[in-house]
Image (cartoon, rainbow, N blue to C red):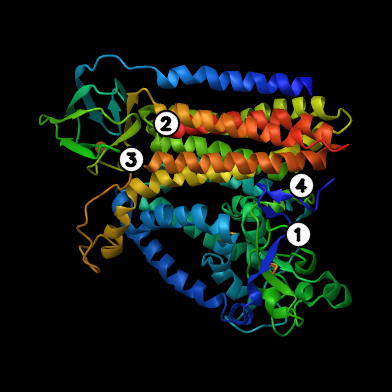
Amino acid sequence: MNDKKDRILGLIPVDWRYDLTSLPYVRRMFKSRWMPFLPIVLNLFVFTVILMAGLTGGVSAGNYNFGIMFVWIVWWVLLMMVMVPVFSRIWCMVCPLPAFAEWMQRGSFLGVRKKLIGLNKKWPKPLKNMWLMNFLFLATTYTTGFITTRPLATFILLMSIIVGSIVLSMIYERRNFCVYGCPVSGFQGLYSNLAMTEIRAKDPEVCKNHKLRECVIGNEKGYACPWMQTPFSMKRNTYCGMCLECFKTCKYDNMVFNLRAPGTDLLVDEKRGLDEAWKAFIMLGISVFFFLIMQGPYGILKDWANANTIEGYLSFVGIHSVFNLLLLPGIFLVFAYASQVLGRKDVPLKKVFINFSYTLVPLGLMAWIAFSFGILFPNSSYVLHVISDPFAWGWDLLGTAKFPWTPFMTGVMPYFQIGTLLLGLALSLDIGFKISKQTFQNREEAVRGYYPIAVFLTAATMFLIWLFTG
Amino acid sequence: MKKDKLLMGILVFIMLAGLPLMLAQSEEPKEYVIPIEAKQFSYTPNIIEVNKGDRVTIRFISTDVHHGLYIDGYELETNARPGQDGSITFVADETGKFAMRCSVTCGSFHPYMIGYLKVKPDYRLFGSIWLALGILIGSVILVSRRQKP
Ligand code: SF4
Ligand code: SF4
Ligand SMILES: [Cu+2]
């Protein structure tokens, strides 16, 4: 049961779209083979500096290191506040980390070759989901005390992504590393469901009559979808890396880049699963832990995350994992059960649980945005320092090397955080009821089944508001 | 429908019950001298609580390296080396929670060296909890209202 007339927050119709590629220069740009090659190369330059700064910075304090500051302030904040919520996986479009792998595989920078270099194996079936990325990302957060404070640790993290992507690209076909293996891919995928833009086929009729499906198999203009999607029938942003190949391969110009209401993918009842549900829990839980470690007042947690003692570090890893993998999903299960009991008992609990887990996406992303305000306002002045002296060699490229640490707008910061979280709640509730209508059979059941979830979401929001600002 | 009304009644009651807390008068302003000790990478005490209007003097002591103390919102700063204390005096006229951050690079976890200043009553917290409840109530009313046969 899904209303065509449904609106997101009562404002924008779920099926409203504005085709940005109807602007001729946007389409021309997307069809050029220089896109996204050029931004990748520019980005590669920035990341080369980041890697060099990471290597030369060693284990010195990270707040005056270009690598640490660019990755964890500029990149992270832009990613969470702008890229994912507005432009979906635009980061993956311009990400330089797997570029070497892709160029090696293609044996070309710009041209289109028929055969890919490497073994080109298919990705193993049991790994065709988010579980690997769930565990890899969780494992990455075990090292948060290092990667965000020691330049060398950030260097190692980025290098392992580069090396990992190269190794996997020589064994498996196309960008399987990005689709199923990159630690930061999973949450971008899940949270991109909330994005305000999407890449889709415009007219299904055109695709139906195009038996060759060149977006899937590739042609002389472009490669087969490197992310193993079927562009002509794609319904969610989750696994579309926005590489733009399908704009080049489609000779009918039927691929479009749409503006849309946020969150419409969350209503697409396709390929929902426990892997994505857990991604939602893990991300929400990590936002709490990251806040406690980075912006909380408890020294003991910092000592734990900093691995001052082995016992402390193991306690951190243990509590962090149990909370994210078991406790949070467990609490949610209770509410999902209540929803099933109130709604309709013959709808499987698993379905209720999975469907409603997608309501955590808006609130989760907004929690990350609220968290990111707590980095942006107090600490962005460090960036001025590091762009003038990226390697701590006493340079002063832009004359800002002596700029002191200057927090700004810290007085109004909590209001930004509260506003963001309340917006997240409103969006989550809105999506929540729509999902409830999909899950149960009629409106009355949907209303009743919605209550427990609404209570959970509100309680979670209040907790986050209290944690961040109270 | 009865259950809905009951649920709504409870929620509205909670919201109204919260009001007196928000409007509660604070006590007479007091004067405090609060020593805060800094050590990589935390403050002791890590949370200080005062009431609106109190006059607060923080004596800032470091027991290992050079640390600082910057108070969000109040935009006040001091710093201390071992044996050389710092101090800040201010009237706590802004309510809410404010992070106190280390302002002198003191080691790897320096950006995470944080304490809290809480000035009661926290209208902002009450207000936002209240708003969250309001959104819940609004949503419940919206979804249970449009009953088409
Ligand atoms: S999946 Fe990871 S490595 Fe691949 S493009 Fe996205 S961020 Fe970069
Ligand atoms: S559908 Fe495939 S080819 Fe098209 S932009 Fe997304 S990842 Fe690239
Ligand atoms: Cu310090």
The answer to whether tags 4 and 1 share a subunit is yes
- Residue A292's x, y, as percent? 44, 33
Establish if A202 lies above or below A405: below
Image quadrant assignment for residue A101: bottom right
Q: Secondary structure at mark 1?
A: loop
Tell me which amino acid carries mark 3.
Gly
Tally of numbered discs = 4
Asked if labels 3 and 4 share a chain, the reply is yes
Percent x, y for residue A194?
A: 63, 52
Mark 3–mark 4 Cα distance, whole angstroms, equals: 41 Å
Residue to which mark 1 is pinned: A235
Residue located farthest toward the left when viewing the structure as drawn: B84
Classify 10 Å Cα crowding around label 4: few (below 14), some (14-19), many (20 and above): some
Alpha carbon of mark 2 to alpha carbon of mark 3: how far?
12 Å
Which residue, given by chain and number where applicable, does mark 4 sit on? A272
Is label 1 on the same chain as label 3? yes
Q: Is residue A273 left or right of residue A403?
A: right
Label 2, on which residue? Answer: B124
Is residue A29 something that shows in the picture?
yes
Separation (CA) of disc 2 from disc 4: 38 Å
C-beta proximity under 8 Å, tags 3 and 4? no
Distance between the alpha carbons at the discs numbered 4 and 1: 12 Å
> At label 4, which amino acid type do we have?
Arg
Q: Is residue B131 toward the left or the right of residue A13 in the image?
A: left
- Dot 3: what SS? loop
User: What residue type is disc 1 on?
Assistant: Lys
Residue A223 is tagged as none
Residue designated by label 3 = A411
Looking at the image, tell me whether mark 4 or mark 1 is earlier in sequence order. 1
**Considering only vertical position in the picture, is B109 above or below A406?**
above
Residue at 55% x, 77% y is A37
